[in-house]
Amino acid sequence: MNYLETVNYLLTRLPMYSRIGAAAYKADLTNTIELCDILENPQLRFKSIHIAGTNGKGSVSHMLAAILQSAGYRTGLYTSPHLYDFRERIRVDGEMIDKDFIVDFVQHIQPHIDVLDPSFFEITVAMAFDYFANQEVDLAVIETGLGGRLDSTNVILPEVSVITNIGYDHMNLLGDTLPLIAGEKAGIIKREVPVIVGEYQEASGPVFVRKAREQRSSISFADRERSATNWSFDGQDLTVEVTLNHTDQKDFYTLDLPGLYQTKNLVTVLQTVHLLKEQGWKIPDAAVHEGLRKTKTLTGFHGRWERVHESPTVIADVAHNEDGFKQLMRQLEITTFHHLHIVMGMVKDKDISGVLAQLPSHARYYFTQADIPRALPADALQAAAQEKGLEGDTYPDVNAALREALAHAQKDDLILVCGSVFLVGEVDKERIGKA
């Protein structure tokens, strides 16, 4: 198989959560352990940082990777899902995994696929670990896919475990209360490996403290150590003042990830960097500033309040659950525009009602769906939205919806594309605004 045939094989032969949902979820680590054994346990041949959380783990992962790259470390980065290119999931120093490596890897592992019947995610995790070992990375930033305790990435022994926050998402798999969801995320806490939690929440904080105590792991809550005390947004970059709590020490950081919700993620990143430095990793302050200022450039990060067109402004954001949309609405409050147009589509297993309750009734809506079996049909989303007083028509795909929004928008309007990672991934950025 060539590269395109190999990727098509992976996407069609293996059960893929992003396409079919819970049926692709493997609730144990058996296959991952077997695959790693076959590959002679590559996960033991590099150091890592493990990141879980309901929202923000992708941003935290990319910011940390950019900082480590800026500090001169050969840095691996594993994230999911991808937006435009399968190879986005696995990077070294910002460069996507080599196509020939993917072909060779699948050729080597294919006989075992027929025996183990692994999921798409299990194979991509094993591929990432093998690639990072092959590339001799100094440190790899590993983002969980779903949950933590039973996530395929949870076979590593990291330098530090990071849990960004806890919210209601994937409740059909992780539990329907915040303590239950927190319990699953806390599964990444390893014995005597320090853990950082992004924010203390009454419902989840004690769960993490208890788990850390059981594992004899030190624990810190980033928002109890540092605070984003001020910020400014110039339409492109976000500048944040961060104060070390209980002191008068402060610093200013400029982020090329302009979403206001990045203030929380920044505090988590800075606490993680502080802990890594205590462990002996050499990360100069200049590298921290450089990495944060150039995260998108250094790591190829997309889909977080990403401006993809001007006049009218088109913003793509992968917010897809209630907490994510709360942060998105805060961003809209500080953004200048005349009229608001929202192109949205969601997947079936999300809390649709909780998301729709966040949305403004004054916007014009364009309901659509991603081209995956898991997508919620546009007419079902429209019907649910109408119950919340949100009006708009349906369209067969995101680009048709976006063309219609552009046809109705004035130059000083704002068009927001949101609701699903997969919907954002199907936006044809090259043809926006073209006939």
Image: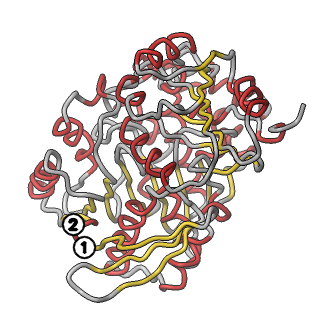
Which is nearer the eye, 11 or 323? 323
Mark on residue 220? 2
Q: Identify the residue at horizontal 21%, vertical 66% (top origin).
A: 220
Q: Position of residue 30 (x, y in %)?
A: 34, 31
Sort mark 2 into few (<14), some (14-19) or many (20+) by Cα contacts within 10 Å: many
Q: CA distance from mark 2 to mark 1?
A: 8 Å
Height in image: 66 above or below 100? below
Q: Which residue is mark 1?
A: 225
Is any part of residue 15 visible from this angle? yes
Q: Position of residue 432 (x, y in %)?
A: 80, 38
**Contact (Cβ within 8 Å) of mark 2 with mark 1:** yes
Q: Is there any visible trace of residue 93 in the rendered image?
A: no
Q: Amino acid at mark 2?
A: Ser
Would you say 36 lies left or right of 271 here?
Answer: right
Pick whichever, 142 or 340, lies toward us: 340
Tell me what residue is drawn at x 9 percent, y 58 percent: 213
